[in-house]
Amino acid sequence: MTKAFVFGKFLPFHKGHEAMIRYANSISDQVSVLICKSDTEEISALIRKHWIEGACADLPALTVLTYEYRERDLPNTSVAARPVSRLWAKVFKRLLPDAQVLVTSEPYGEMVAEFMNIRHVAFDSARMLFPVSASRINADRISNWHFLPETVKPFYAIKVVILGTESTGKTTLTQRLARHYGCSYVLEAARHIIADSNHFEINDLYRVVDRHTHDIEKACCGDHALVIIDTNVLITESYAEFAFGEKLKVDDTVSRVNQASLYLYLNNDVSYYQDGTRLSKEDRDRLDSSHRLVLTRYGILPAEISGNWEERFRDAVRRIDVLLKKYFHEI
């Protein structure tokens, strides 16, 4: 029985990593993937383990392991130097004593395997099959988005949430921004569940939260890193407090999915349009105050968007462009 292993930081895990793991699986009977997480890295080893296990769920002979270490004790695994390879070879030999094959796409792979006295098999060292690396993705998340597996995309999606009360143009702006950037978008789930803002039950709001959260998760797996989202769970909570004097009980997963990189709040300084299903203008304006109180309570300070429809669009684009620029410079 041949036992192979693959190791790395997987920050992030990408399709090149996945292909290497699948190749290791094809040449062995058992494959171990070792995630090496240093004490200076914020993304947990468990999150990375979830990425890999999700993307490779069809490989029954795969085992994903984690190893957490302090950088003052061990150097970075990606350094191609014999002293570094010798140190890590000792660690790997202790953690994986039965390993017979090491599969890597890096120059240090041969050295590590030599010190472990096992065979090294190189995979796509020239990056011809998958011209990508974790550092390239971190430097330009948008251009390299297609190299991320669906299990990883939701973690790295750039979410922009459009907030505001009724009749402030959230839906129109959401769709227009999505067309402008060629990205995915999520419309307010309540429009499909609550026909009239004056008549609904608290359970309807929980249904809204579930549907909206599901829609966000799905959109984050799309073909673009940017996702424009109409409304989020805090606005639904504001409705609950406004209509029933109750706070919604949502779990941490829902809260995480609804978090965004940028929040844009549409002021209610435009003409109010009553379509027969909306609150009265007076209640709409009271609800606006409720929204702002809830957002403040959760530490959300959105950017204010005012003016006519064209001014709102231009201001939103300006702010989103500023946000996107930083994703071309993260290392």
Image: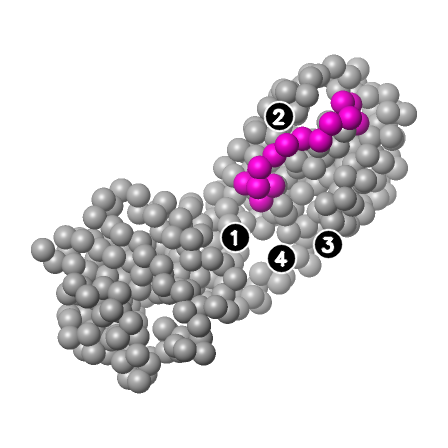
Image depth: mark 3 or mark 2 in front: 2
Question: Which residue in the structure is indicated by mark 1?
Answer: 156
**Which amino acid, mark 4?**
Leu
Residue 84: image x %, image y %?
Answer: 33, 81
The amino acid on which the numbered mark 2 sits, given as a three-letter code, is Tyr
Q: CA distance from mark 1 to mark 2?
A: 26 Å
Q: Earlier in the sequence, mark 1 or mark 3?
A: 1
Q: In front: 92, or 135?
A: 92
SS of the residue under disc 4: helix
Q: CA distance from mark 3 to mark 4?
A: 10 Å
From the top left corner, tell me how far across and down residue 208 is, in percent: 62, 26
Inspect the magenta stretch and tell me whether residue 18 lies in it: no
Residue mark closest to the camera, 1 vs 3 = 1
**Is disc 1 surrounded by few (<14), some (14 to 19) or many (20+) residues within 10 Å?**
some
Residue that numbered label 3 is attached to: 318
- Expressed as whole percent of the image width and height from the top left, the position of residue 2 reads 12, 58
Identity of the residue drawn at 42% across and 53% down = 46
Residue where numbered disc 2 is placed: 206
Q: Residues within 10 Å of mark 3 (few under 14, many from 20)?
A: few
| Residue at 84% over, 44% down | 306
In the depicted structure, whether residue 290 falls above or below residue 67? above
Mark 1 or 2: the one toward you: 2
Disc 1 residue type? Tyr
Q: Secondary structure at mark 1?
A: helix
For the residue labelled by badge 2, is the local secondary structure a helix, a strand or a loop?
helix
Q: Which mark is residue 324?
A: 4
263 relative to 311 in the view: left or right: left
Residue stretch rendered in magenta on the structure: 242-256
